[in-house]
Image (tube, rainbow, N blue to C red):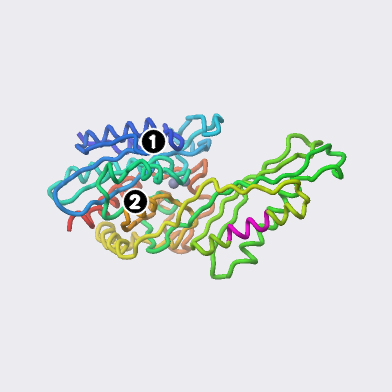
Amino acid sequence: MSIDVESLYRDLHANPELSFQEHRTAGIVAGHLGDLGLDVQTGIGGTGVVGVLENGPGPTVLLRADMDGLPVLEATGLDYASTATALDSDERQVPVMHACGHDVHVACLIGAVEKLAAELGSWSGTLVALFQPAEEYGNGAQTMVDDGLFAKVPAPDVVLGQHVAPFPAGWLGLHPGVAMASADSLKITLHGSGGHGSRPETTVDPVLLAAATTMRMQGIVSRELAASDQAVLTVGQIHAGTKNNIIAAEATLGLSVRTFDESVRAKMLSSIERVVRGEAMTSGSPREPEIALEEHFPLTVNDPDASARVTTAFAARFGADRLIDPGAVAGSEDVGILATAAGVPLVYWLLGGADPGLIKNFAATGRMPEDVPSNHSPRFAPHIRPTLAVGIDALVAGAMAWLAE
Ligand code: ZN
Ligand code: ZN
């Protein structure tokens, strides 16, 4: 009895779960892996699930999917749209949506395992199918590693995975070398001294301090980095105050910093600290500001030799005209932690999920129309066809590049 992967996908999409809360998803995954004859372990790093299929001598290939959704109110209008809500890690009731397409990754990996399990005569080696929690926090993979992942399952010779992205379905994107940015999420607490809105002379206004700090930090990328270096600094959150006629006592900033090089990252972090401390001093803050690193995603680096092997396999399976090199993208991933922990190569590619009819525009300009929703958008809605079929075949072709030797 074969698995209806499209139905599985719609069910996962309609029932997303937040990071480290992927209990239902993990149960469904474990059920399918068990039915397909894999040796299944659950609860690795919280909700992580791993299925192992040993099929004679040969290399061990780890295929990875992430399982978590996001606190986004879905606005796709799909008949399988999510209406789910959940309590987030701050105990707030939030809407939940598979706005990053991790449901695509789960469905495709189940479909790929089914294909590989049905073709045991055509390959030899060990397949490790890994479903991780909490990619969106940047620490789901690390949590599985810290829980003794590679003592519980065979250590791989290569780690492979994919992420659905807003370019036309039917196409795959693979970039050797640094493929995705490193990301740092910082929380900055700025201290003022509160008081009456009519008497600023008795206060240190943290709103002005927050605004000045935000403005000044935008000079770091433009004035302190070389033209050849790349970075993004986004202030995604500013919070202060409760009422128009009260000057608040503190303000917080939430930053996202993307870099493609360790030395640029170090420079960015030290410049941010200098600006934050400098502006606090300029404002006359009564206390030193606090800078907390809340999340860190490492660089995602595709091994050149292993990438060439996957590219050859994709060209043979799909045709070279279906492959694009998207360059290094500013999104971030924690999949590299699995490869780094095992000391083996990583190949992580992008799977087109948008309207395949947009390919002419995309091929001509290298860009998608700006109204095509990106990952994390409330309107992010991958086309089921041919995205799922291509994602399944890409995982199979990538794995077979090692297992069919
Ligand atoms: Zn995401
Ligand atoms: Zn994602």
Q: At label 2, which amino acid type do we have? A: Gly
Quarter containing the N terminus: top left
Work out whether 2 lies above or below 264.
Answer: above
Q: Of 249 and 379, which appears nearest the observer?
A: 249
Work out whether 64 lies above or below 8.
Answer: below
Work out whether 153 lies above or below 34.
Answer: below
Query: Marks 1/2: CA distance?
Result: 21 Å
315 to the left or right of 333: left
Magenta segment includes 380: no
Q: Main secondary structure of the magenta part?
A: helix
The magenta-colored residue range is 268-276
Disc on res. 161: 2
Residue at figure coordinates x 21%, y 46% from the top left:
116
Check disc 1 and report the residue beneath it: 46
The mark lying in front, picked from 1 and 2, is: 1
Secondary structure beneath disc 2?
strand
Residue at figure coordinates x 51%, y 47% from the top left:
295
Q: Disc 1 vs disc 2: Cβ atoms closer than 8 Å?
A: no
Residue 91 in picture, x, y percent from top left: 55, 30
Which callout, 1 or 2, points at the residue further toward the start of the chain? 1
How many labels were placed on the picture? 2
Can residue 384 be seen by looking at this rendering? no
The crowding category of the residue bearing disc 2, from other C-alpha atoms within 10 Å (few below 14, some 14 to 19, many at least 20), is many
363 to the left or right of 252: left
Residue 80 in picture, x, y percent from top left: 42, 33
Q: At label 1, which amino acid type do we have? A: Gly
Residue 273, quarter of the rendered image: bottom right
Queried on whether the Cβ of the residue with tag 1 lies below 8 angstroms from ligand 2, the answer reads: no
